[in-house]
Image (spheres, rainbow, N blue to C red):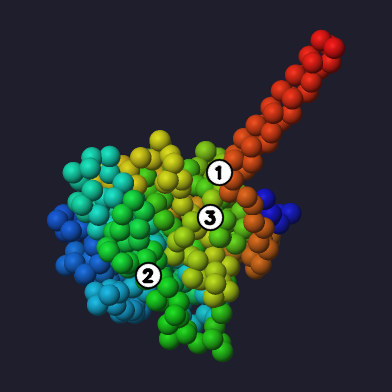
């Protein structure tokens, strides 16, 4: 892990309200209980309006931009909210809000064409963003950067055991947004410090992985901040290592240091709900929402609060070290053990033959 010699969380009272966030998850699931937030559905449209309403409840003049795009003639929308637009450094906090059209991994074959409620994947990340926006708006004059709260459509419809929507790829919304990103900022006077993606951050048995497409110096710093808050199980010292195709990748390719907070969703008995009809409110943990929200809140205070000048982290998060995926390391170890076993077997048998001679 890389981190500055003086990476110690600044002493500040954290205000993230996990009960609020839990309500925001519930609200998103209740918008449309037939199609949830599938791209092209009324529920998806109403969810975008829900975000606008929640931000305007924070401040009626909260700047927002609706980014319209189409995928195979289906109308989609990313929704961007800006705070502290007068400042030139930008930090993006993002999450996807679409829910998967088909529960392609459901253990009940009869339910695999049913829509996924998407409580954790991705209503949880959106819920955390809403409460962080409430907090940061109240502290906006004490924060030294501009914040983008970015809600992605059309992330979760690619192919795993089948397509979410036929012919769609993953991360359509973030790819489209980055294609048009220069429409949303002035590259001559503004610059991006970082992008942090929250994906599946509110489920039971929360444990984040070391996502390998992330900028390691940024992700390592977030992990260390979480551990110093006492969340050592959720930010383990030896996390699963894996590269995940997710909404942060387009920003990485654009040159923005980016980190994906995400769990092991592909091979994890502690989280069996991925792309099933059981990714519902019963699988959401208030504690997980609190851990995620407070860790990101602390990250922001460490780096962007007026009184945080003595903090020394990994900024500007340029260092990036790639590790081998856990599965590859395991495969190498297994193959090495097999080869070692063959050699041992060979030498033992050779010794027996010589003894007989």
Q: Mark 2 points at which residue?
A: 172
Badge nearest the viewer, 3 or 1: 1
Q: In this view, does 337 lie above or below 41?
A: above
Q: Can you name the residue that lies furthest to the bottom here?
A: 188
What residue does disc 3 label?
243
Other-residue count near label 1 (Cα within 10 Å), few / some / many at <14 / 14–19 / ≥20? few
Q: Residue at x 57, y 56 (%)?
A: 212
Give the x, y percent position of residue 30: 18, 55
- Name the spot of residue 73 as percent of width and height, x first: 24, 77
Judging by the rendered image, the residue that carries numbered circle 1 is: 327
Q: Which of marks 1 and 2 is in front?
A: 1
Q: Which residue is drawn at 27% across and 75% down?
A: 72
**Would residue 334 be found to the left or right of residue 346 on screen?**
left
- Give the residue at x 29% y 77%: 70
Is residue 278 shown above or below 300? Answer: above
Q: CA separation, marks 3 and 1? A: 11 Å
């Amino acid at each position: 892990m890389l981190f500055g010699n003086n990476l110690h969380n600044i002493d500040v009272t954290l205000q993230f309200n996990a009960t609020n966030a839990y309500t925001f998850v519930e609200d998103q699931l209740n918008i449309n209980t037939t199609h949830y937030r599938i791209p092209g559905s009324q529920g998806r449209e109403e969810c975008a309006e829900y975000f606008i309403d929640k931000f305007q409840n924070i401040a009626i003049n909260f700047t927002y931009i609706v980014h319209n795009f189409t995928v195979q003639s289906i109308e989609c929308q990313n929704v961007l909210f800006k705070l502290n637009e007068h400042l030139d450094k930008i930090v993006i906090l993002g999450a996807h809000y679409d829910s998967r059209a088909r529960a392609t991994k459901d253990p009940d074959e009869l339910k695999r064409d049913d829509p996924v409620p998407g409580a954790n994947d991705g209503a949880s990340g959106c819920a955390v963003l809403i409460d962080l926006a409430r907090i940061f708006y109240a502290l906006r004059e004490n924060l030294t950067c501009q914040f983008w709260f970015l809600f992605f459509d059309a992330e979760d419809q690619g192919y795993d055991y089948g397509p979410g929507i036929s012919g769609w790829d993953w991360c359509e919304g973030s790819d489209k947004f980055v294609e048009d990103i220069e429409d949303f900022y002035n590259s001559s006077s503004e610059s991006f410090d970082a992008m942090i993606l929250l994906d599946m951050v509110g489920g039971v048995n929360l444990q984040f992985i070391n996502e390998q497409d992330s900028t390691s110096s940024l992700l390592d710093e977030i992990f260390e901040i979480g551990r110093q808050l006492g969340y050592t199980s959720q930010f383990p010292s030896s996390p699963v290592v894996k590269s995940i195709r997710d909404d942060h990748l387009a920003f990485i390719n654009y040159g923005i240091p980016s980190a994906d907070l995400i769990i092991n969703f592909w091979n994890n008995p502690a989280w069996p709900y991925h792309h099933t009809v059981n990714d519902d409110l019963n699988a959401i943990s208030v504690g997980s929402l609190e851990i995620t929200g407070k860790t990101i809140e602390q990250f922001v205070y460490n780096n962007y609060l007026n009184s945080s000048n003595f903090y020394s982290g990994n900024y500007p998060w340029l260092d990036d070290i790639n590790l081998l995926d856990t599965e590859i390391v395991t495969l190498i170890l297994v193959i090495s053990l097999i080869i070692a076993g063959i050699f041992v077997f060979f030498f033992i048998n050779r010794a027996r033959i010589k003894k007989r001679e």
